[in-house]
Image: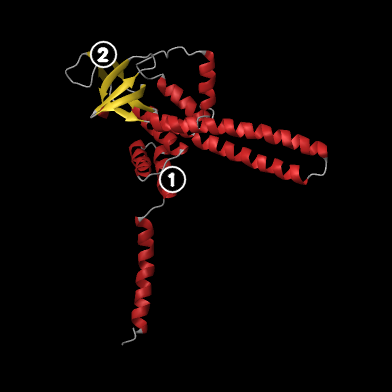
């Protein structure tokens, strides 16, 4: 067997070293793409910014800042439907983000449809606000924090020599267990809602809803770009939608994008 010459080994190493910069340029990191998109947004190249943000999303990445910046880019181009869609996605991840809330409320003022929601009984509204206090991840972290506090109470209860401390941490632990069960119930409800409750945004300038999933059926009502609707059902290439005021109709799927 021949032993490779020293010159060949040196050439092989030089070839690898030469290729490394090319490989790094050919495969930019997620941070590189996100930073480039932000730079394009700042310099007014909104089309390029959108292309790079969308590239990250197609690769499976998501985040509040990603959807928020993408929504801002679409708004700058006057594409209201896409802007609202991405603000809604950002809000799903961070329900208490004030910047997202502000921009979403502002862009909603630009929509044509001003549909009043059906009034809710105050207890139902209170329950809805509680469910929306955190996203699923937020409730998960909240439950984890409570669980850790329960463990601390258990440790202190068994190792403290004072009876009054034992009583205090025993009662605190019971309260935390009840709070844990309550928070776990809310988490399960939110997970079920995310799996079964679909909402979408109208993407076309004007959309005619039908009384049934058939092009020849009677027109039910018209809605416009940017309106948020609830997806009640689907059949082939049709969505059954429900408006905030309770109206129900069927629309073509391509005219709605799911949040």
- In the image, residue 115 sits, relative to residue 147, either above or below, namely above
* Sequence-earlier tag: 1 or 2: 1
Q: Quadrant of the C terminus?
A: top left
Q: Which mark is residue 229?
A: none
Q: Quadrant of the N terminus?
A: bottom left
Please tell me which residue is depicted at 31% across the width and 16% down the height of the picture: 248
Residue 211 location in percent, x, y?
A: 24, 16
Please tell me which residue is depicted at 22% across the width and 22% down the height of the picture: 213
- In the image, residue 23 sits, relative to residue 106, either above or below, namely below
How many marks can you see?
2
Element marked by disc 2:
strand
Q: CA distance from mark 1 to mark 2?
A: 46 Å
Element marked by disc 1:
helix
Residue 176 can be seen, yes or no: yes
Q: How many residues crowd mark 2 within 10 Å: few (<14), some (14–19), many (20+)?
A: some
Residue 78 can be seen, yes or no: no
Quickly name the residue at label 2.
220
192 sits to left or right of 133: left
Is 4 or 124 nearer to us in this picture?
124
138 sits to left or right of 157: left
227 sits to left or right of 151: left
Rendered image quadrant of residue 238? top left
Please tell me which residue is depicted at 54% across the width and 38% down the height of the picture: 140
**Does the residue at mark 1 contact the one at mark 2 (Cβ under 8 Å)?**
no
Q: Which mark is residue 35?
A: 1
Is 135 or 255 nearer to us in this picture?
135
Please tell me which residue is depicted at 47% across the width and 34% down the height of the picture: 93
Residue 92 location in percent, x, y?
A: 45, 32
């Amino acid at each position: 067997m021949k032993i490779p010459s020293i010159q060949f080994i040196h050439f092989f190493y030089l070839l690898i070293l030469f290729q490394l910069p090319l490989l790094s340029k050919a495969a930019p990191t997620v941070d590189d793409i996100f930073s480039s998109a932000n730079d394009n947004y700042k310099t007014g190249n909104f089309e390029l910014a959108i292309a790079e943000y969308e590239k990250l999303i197609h690769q499976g990445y998501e985040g509040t800042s990603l959807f928020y910046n993408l929504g801002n880019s679409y708004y700058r181009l006057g594409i209201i439907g896409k802007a609202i869609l991405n603000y809604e996605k950002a809000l799903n991840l961070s329900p208490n983000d004030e910047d997202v809330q502000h921009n979403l409320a502002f862009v909603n003022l630009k929509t044509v449809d001003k549909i009043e929601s059906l009034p809710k009984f105050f207890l139902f509204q209170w329950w809805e606000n509680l469910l929306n206090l955190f996203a699923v991840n937020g409730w998960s972290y909240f439950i984890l924090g409570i669980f850790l506090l329960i463990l601390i109470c258990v440790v202190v209860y068994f190792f403290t020599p004072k009876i009054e401390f034992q009583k205090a941490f025993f009662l605190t632990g019971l309260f935390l267990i009840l709070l844990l069960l309550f928070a776990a119930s809310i988490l399960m409800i939110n997970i079920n809602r995310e799996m079964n409750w679909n909402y979408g945004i109208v993407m076309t300038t004007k959309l005619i809803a039908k009384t049934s999933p058939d092009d020849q059926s009677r027109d039910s009502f018209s809605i416009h770009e940017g309106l948020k609707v609830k997806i009640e059902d689907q059949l082939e290439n049709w969505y059954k939608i429900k408006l905030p005021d309770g109206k129900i109709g069927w629309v073509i799927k391509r005219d709605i994008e799911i949040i």
